[in-house]
Image: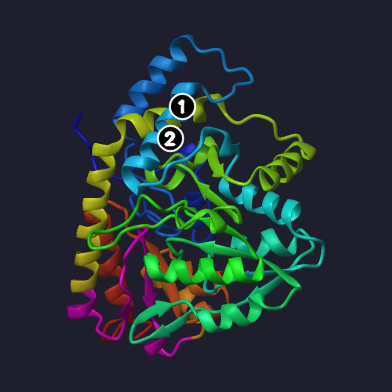
Amino acid sequence: MAHDFSTLIDRTAQGSAKWAAMRRANPEVLVGIPPFSVADLDLPQAPEIVAGLREFLADAVLGYTEPTPACTRALIDWMTRRHDWRIAPDSIVWTNGVVPALCTAVRALTPTGAGVIVQPPVYYPFYSAIERNGRRVVRNPLLLQDGRYRMDLDGLRRLAADPANTMLILCSPHNPVGRVWTHDELRAVAAIAVEHELIVVSDEIHCDLVLPGHRHTTLASLGQEIARRSIVCTAPSKTFNLAGLCTSHIVISDAALRGRFRAELESQGQFFVSAPGLKACELAYTHGQEWLDGLLRLIASNQALLREFLRERLPTMGVLPLEGTYLQWLDFRKLGMSAAALKRAHQDEAVVFFAEGTTFGAEGAGFARMNIAAPRAALLAALERLALCHGPGGPAA
């Protein structure tokens, strides 16, 4: 099938959360200008998934539904092919999303008041999953050295040694900084977790979105000891733009942890996930490889375009290396603007809607996250507006 990565879909009338937020913030936004904030796509869906869902819905009964053997097999085969990770069917727990799974894991697997370690700047729902469930956020900030982020393993080791800290939520690949943690980095994390008996919730929702020259390693694939302490959160949501179907698969190898996780899910009445979501998952993992290859080419091409544009037109802006995800971390610190002034300049002057850096923690001050999985023309137009705003003579220069 032909795959279209050049058409921009205005999702305002569809109730898109990010388009609605953009228009609330600036009602004067012209038609044809998309937001670059939230991590979903304004591109046509993979036609293989659309066609398969149409066929499914023609005679489907949309009642309470369990994953079929075909759905489970599609997931297992995908993870084996792409990540050399072999999943036991009974280790899979289906949930209504990765963020609900994070909340469930925190409640089920840590005591009230426990410390949960995160590594900011990091995906902002990590904070609410911890704090709204009566636990404490324990920060182990990433280190930015020579233009590249790395984990502070010494800091992690020190925090893990405190018995009051019982869980680490790992972001792998890391949102928003775009790192794909190496095999050696993850082995070090695993060793710390095993030594200090930390439970690790590994958010690997971006695992399929890895750029050339890098390879994703699933934490639970690094041996039985760490697998027994891991809750690996994955989904087709980011890979195939299916977040609205609210269907995720959580892999928990240890039967005791899995039992506690399931019990917490069921205590909140979560027994089933979306019937169309399960079918879309099966279709994506069975027929979506070619479409994903095209998306990855778009991301790599757009990242190269962005780097070259900023080098020539906005050399004061920094571009962090993008190894995985389609979320580009941009460095505006040399402009010397406050977070509030930067946000106003972007939304009101440039009309470019980012996820502002402080959303991901205080460590994100002076940065912004840009979703670059957009039609090339839309990205280039946004960069031109940014150059007018921050370039010589611009209102935010």
Whether 279 is drawn above or below 311: the answer is above
What range is drawn magenta here?
309-337
Q: Is residue 321 visible?
A: yes
Label 1's element? helix
Kindly report the distance in space between the C-alpha atoms of the residues bearing marks 1 and 2.
6 Å
Q: Which residue is mark 1?
A: 71
Quarter of the image where one finds residue 129: bottom right
Q: Give 174 or 184, whichever is nearer the viewer.
A: 184
Instruction: Tell whether 266 sits left or right of 214.
Output: right
Whether 161 is drawn above or below 40: the answer is below
Whether tag 1 and tag 2 are in contact, CB under 8 A, the answer is yes
Q: Is residue 347 visible?
A: no
Q: How is the image coloured?
A: rainbow
x, y percentage for residue 112?
A: 82, 62
Q: Which residue is mark 2?
A: 75
Quarter of the image where one finds residue 290: top left
Q: Give 249 or 161, whichever is nearer the viewer.
A: 161
Callout 1 amino acid: Cys
Q: Residue at x 70, y 35 (%)?
A: 270
Q: Residue at x 34, y 83 (%)?
A: 147
Q: Give 311 or 261, whichever is nearer the viewer.
A: 261
Q: Residue at x 54, y 84 (%)?
A: 154
x, y percentage for residue 195?
A: 61, 70
x, y percentage for residue 248?
A: 53, 40
Quarter of the picture containing the C terminus is bottom left
Whether 121 is drawn above or below 44: the answer is below
Quarter of the image where one finds residue 283: top left
Callout 2 amino acid: Leu
Crowd tier of the residue under label 2, counting other residues whose Cα lies within 10 Å: few below 14, some 14–19, many 20 or above: many
Crowd tier of the residue under label 1, counting other residues whose Cα lies within 10 Å: few below 14, some 14–19, many 20 or above: some
